[in-house]
Image: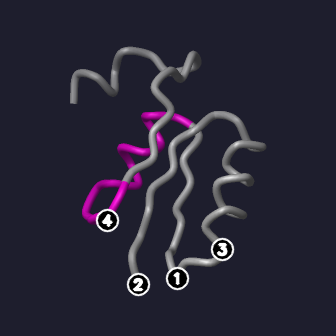
Amino acid sequence: MKTILVVDDNADRMQQFAQGMQRYEVDIVFAQSNAEAMEKMEGRNFDAIALETYLPRDDDEYRRR
């Protein structure tokens, strides 16, 4: 099964994404910040990442990794 990481701080958009992907056999992992996404990526490979391009709550720490 393919695994997708979805990074978005908007719960409604994450739910819409999950509903749209129901017809496909994929495992979806959600993160609400870039920092959380980085934690979830440690030691794990994803087949795709859907990333919101602007997450206002994030600080610059994740960019330094």
Residue at label 3?
Answer: 22
Secondary element under disc 2, as helix, strand or loop, is loop
Location of residue 19 with respect to 60 vertically, above or below: below
The amino acid pointed to by label 4 is: Asp
Are the two marked residues, 4 and 1, in contact with CB atoms closer than 8 angstroms?
no
Secondary element under disc 3, as helix, strand or loop, is loop
Q: Which mark is residue 17?
A: none
Location of residue 28 with respect to 6 vertically, above or below: below
Q: Number of marks in the image?
A: 4
The amino acid pointed to by label 3 is: Gln
Location of residue 32 with respect to 42 vertically, above or below: above
Gap in angstroms between the C-alphas marked 1 and 2? 6 Å
Q: Which mark is residue 47?
A: 4
Are the two marked residues, 1 and 2, in contact with CB atoms closer than 8 angstroms?
yes
Q: Which mark is residue 1?
A: 2
Residue at label 1?
Answer: 25
Specify start and end residues of the magenta stretch as a single range: 33-48
Quarter of the C terminus within the rendering: top left
Q: Earlier in the sequence, mark 2 or mark 3?
A: 2
Q: Earlier in the sequence, mark 4 or mark 1?
A: 1
Residue at left offset 22%, top offset 22%: 64
The amino acid pointed to by label 1 is: Glu
Q: Position of residue 46 (x, y in %)?
A: 32, 63
Q: Earlier in the sequence, mark 4 or mark 3?
A: 3
Taking depth in this image into account, of 16 and 35 the one nearest to the observer is 16
Describe residue 26's horizontal placement relative to residue 44 as left or right.
right
Q: Position of residue 11 (x, y in %)?
A: 74, 43
The crowd level at tag 4 (other Cα within 10 Å; few <14, some 14-19, many 20+) is: few
Secondary element under disc 4, as helix, strand or loop, is loop
Q: Earlier in the sequence, mark 2 or mark 4?
A: 2
